[in-house]
Image: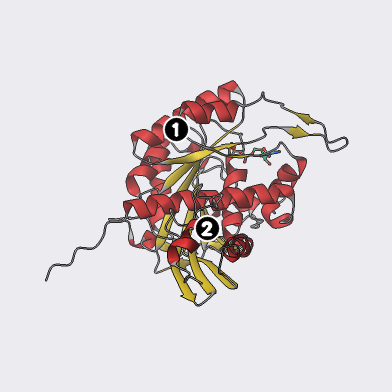
């Protein structure tokens, strides 16, 4: 019998597509080692995105494929993950160990941007990542409420100038709401608000994070520009509802990020369909296929389509977003899928942007 070789195993693995990378694991360079000993094979796969909820199932699928290769009597596939860091040359010290900054943005208010940011952060944490949330929605901060942090909670201060973020549900949260009373920020004009955001970003002890999710204020003004100038944002996620007007605003958001060279990771269409809780009937409340059309026109991907759901609203506004309140629900599964896809897109960008170190003797 002829000996097994690496190419046979690779070609079996090439038949499968990683649903988050949209690529087979060999082309995506996730296959780090293949060890063949007679008829038994061990494969090590390392994903570039947090994937605790996915890795075991994926390992089984890959293993079955290897087992089908003629001549294999025993196969073992180990799947692990490690989040690569985006280059962030010149980042302030407090952000030096933050691997990826993700901006969650929308062109207009009330489309569910904060809800998406909170659930995304929790979903990333559930995948095993170290996660922080910065509530940059200075005029209407809501992450404190969404993370169930009691009103009036203040962050500890170190060395008289560094804030310690508040930990809730395994995520480090920082918000203007922790520093001011309800009305202070409302009276600020653009440059003041931008200055406050800069302080929150650079004077918070974020520590070692795989992802820092930034809940941006709606629109395309000073604050968005400050963020893009002060830190290297790894990617932006645009949240929109399917209405035409909201889409128009979302387009402005996409254009703004492109202008400042921040990659747009994709679009999340929120409140896309209403599922009747009595009869299960599905209705497109704000029109059908808007997010898809936007994604097509701007060559960005529609990464998730969230239903209009009473549970999303009640759980989020009640201080326990769906991902935390009901992690096994269908809605939570969509958020998990979104979190892994966002992570996967960032990993591709990080590998592509990595500059090899040049050694000069
Ligand atoms: N998919 C959904 N189904 C039902 N309710 C939702 C959904 N997404 C968000 N909501 C609700 O809509 C309201 C607005 O959501 P959210 O605060 O996340 O919007 P936003 O875009 O961040 O608004 P703003 O920019 O004004 O802060 C909240 O009460 C939230 O619970």
Answer left or right for 45 relative to 68: left
- In x, y percent, where is residue 191? 38, 38
- In x, y percent, where is residue 287? 67, 23
Q: Which residue is mark 1?
A: 254
Q: Is residue 111 above or below residue 62?
A: above
Would residue 275 be visible to someone looking at this image? yes
Q: Is residue 335 above or below residue 256?
A: below
Number of disc labels:
2
User: Between disc 1 and disc 2, whose residue precedes?
Assistant: 2
- In x, y percent, where is residue 21? 50, 50
The foreground one among 180 and 81 is 81
- In x, y percent, where is residue 331? 70, 47
Residue at the location (66% across, 39% down)?
A: 306
Answer left or right for 232 relative to 163: left
Determine if the C-beta at disc 2 is less than 8 A from ligand 1.
no
Residue at the location (49% across, 37% down)?
A: 187
Under tag 2, what secondary structure?
helix
Q: Quadrant of the C terminus?
A: bottom left
The foreground one among 108 and 85 is 85
Quadrant containing ligand 1:
top right
Q: CA distance from mark 1 to mark 2?
A: 39 Å
Q: Which residue is mark 2?
A: 12
The foreground one among 214 and 297 is 297
Residue at the location (46% across, 73% down)?
A: 35
């Amino acid at each position: 019998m002829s000996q097994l070789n690496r190419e046979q195993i690779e070609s079996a693995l090439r038949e499968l597509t990683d649903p988050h990378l949209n690529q087979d694991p060999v082309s995506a360079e996730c296959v780090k080692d293949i060890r063949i000993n007679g008829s038994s094979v061990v494969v090590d796969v390392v994903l570039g995105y947090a994937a605790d909820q996915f890795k075991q199932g994926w390992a089984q699928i890959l293993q079955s494929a290897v087992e089908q290769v003629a001549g294999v009597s025993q196969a073992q596939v180990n799947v692990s993950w490690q989040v690569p860091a985006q280059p962030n040359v010149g980042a302030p010290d407090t952000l030096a160990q933050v691997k990826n900054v993700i901006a969650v943005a929308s062109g207009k208010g009330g489309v569910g941007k904060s809800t998406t940011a909170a659930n995304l952060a929790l979903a990333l944490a559930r995948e095993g990542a170290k996660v922080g949330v910065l509530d940059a929605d200075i005029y209407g901060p809501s992450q404190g409420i969404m993370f169930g942090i009691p009103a009036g909670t203040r962050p500890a201060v170190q060395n008289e100038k560094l804030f310690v973020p508040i930990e809730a549900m395994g995520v480090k949260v920082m918000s203007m709401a922790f520093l001011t009373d309800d009305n202070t920020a409302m009276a600020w004009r653009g440059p003041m608000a931008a200055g406050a955001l800069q302080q929150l970003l650079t004077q918070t002890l974020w520590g070692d994070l795989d992802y820092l999710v930034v809940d941006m204020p709606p629109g395309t003004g000073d604050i968005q520009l400050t963020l893009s100038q002060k830190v290297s944002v790894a990617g932006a996620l645009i949240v929109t509802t399917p209405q035409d007007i909201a889409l128009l605003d979302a387009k402005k958001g996409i254009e703004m990020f492109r202008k400042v060279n921040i990659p747009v990771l994709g679009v999340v269409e929120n409140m896309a369909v209403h599922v009747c809780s009595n009869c299960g009937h599905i209705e497109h409340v704000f029109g059908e296929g808007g997010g898809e059309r936007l994604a097509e026109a701007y060559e960005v991907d529609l990464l998730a389509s969230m239903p209009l759901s009473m549970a999303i609203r009640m759980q989020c506004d009640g201080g326990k977003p769906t991902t935390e309140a009901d992690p096994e629900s269908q809605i939570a599964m969509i958020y998990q899928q979104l979190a892994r896809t966002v992570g996967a897109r960032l990993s591709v960008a990080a590998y592509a942007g990595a500059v090899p170190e040049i050694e000069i003797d």
